[in-house]
Amino acid sequence: MLKKFLSKNIQVLDQIETWREAIKIAAVPLVEDMSITHEYIISMIENVEKNGSYIVIAPGVAIPHSRPEHGVLKTGLSLLKLKKGVMFPEEKEVKIIFVLAANDNETHLELISELANLIMEEEQVAKLFLAKNEAEALECIN
Amino acid sequence: MLKKSLLIIDPAGLHARPVSILTAEAIKHKSKIEIEFDNRKANLKSILSVMGLGVTPDSKIMIYVDGEDEETALSGLMEAFKVNKLAM
């Protein structure tokens, strides 16, 4: 499921100054393919402001997301890989951002579960951290 | 070893936020703490491990606590499940 969703939604960039900007840019492919509205981006940012950086679920990896009713039009997933890390609250440095948008709770759990299993594969993630372009990044997704 | 069966009442299941709350409680304790769902076990001290289970609403889970502080660990976890309306 991950590869199918990510095939056209990967960006590899050098650097972004702030975590808010990083979430916005990471979500652009999902706005463009009509998976989410701008409201969803605002909601993801507010979620971090309110609840902290729990979305940084492994060293260097964040999965910003919000509730289906906050602007999900259809289920989608995007990936932003940064060469230089961006700081999230609580001094957490992030280089890999998966934006998660699920239009129902069941799909949300499935996507999170698949992502978690991917992120536990150390070898794949190590390769993803080094990916120089979109194609290299996509190769790391099973 | 102690174990406790629970029913997930959070309408969204154990999504990212609840899992982060539970792992934060679990890592306070020395005991080995596991969660079982759908015949699969995960380490309750690892966010990724628990998220990998994809625990759905209205499902039954089992918590296993094993170690020198197992009683305080289990009561701390039950409090976290209850206060955050995750399971009963």
Image (spheres, helix red, strand yellow):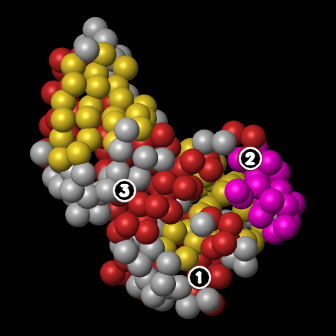
Q: Is A127 colored magenta in this rendering?
A: yes
The residue that appears at 31% across and 12% down in the rendered structure is B67
The answer, for residue A59, to whether it is visible in the render is no
Q: Quadrant of residue A46?
A: bottom left
In three-dimensional space, the C-alpha distance between marks 3 and 1, rounded to whole angstroms, equals 21 Å
The location of residue B80, given as percent across then percent down, is 20, 40
Q: Are marks 2 and 1 on the same chain?
A: yes
Q: Nearer the viewer, mark 2 or mark 1?
A: 2
- Three-letter code for the amino acid on which mark 3 is drawn: His
Q: Is residue A105 above or below residue A114?
A: below
Find residue A31 and report its image quarter: bottom right
Q: Residues within 10 Å of mark 1 (few under 14, many from 20)?
A: many
In the picture provided, is B78 more to the left or to the right than A44? left
In the rendered image, the quadrant that contains the N terminus of chain A is: bottom right
| Number of marks drawn | 3
Residue at the image position 63 percent from the left and 73 percent from the top: A5
The answer to whether residue A53 is left or right of residue A138 is left
Which element type, helix, strand or loop, lies under badge 1? helix
Which residues, given as a range, are shown in magenta? A125-142
Disc on the earlier residue, 2 or 1: 1
Residue at the spot 77% in from the left edge and 64% down from the top edge: A138
Amino acid residing under circle 1: Leu
Q: Please tell me in which quadrant of the rendered image residue A44 appears.
A: bottom left
Residue A30 tag number:
1
**Residue beneath label 2, please?**
A124
Specify the principal SS of the magenta part: helix
Q: Amino acid at mark 2?
A: Gln
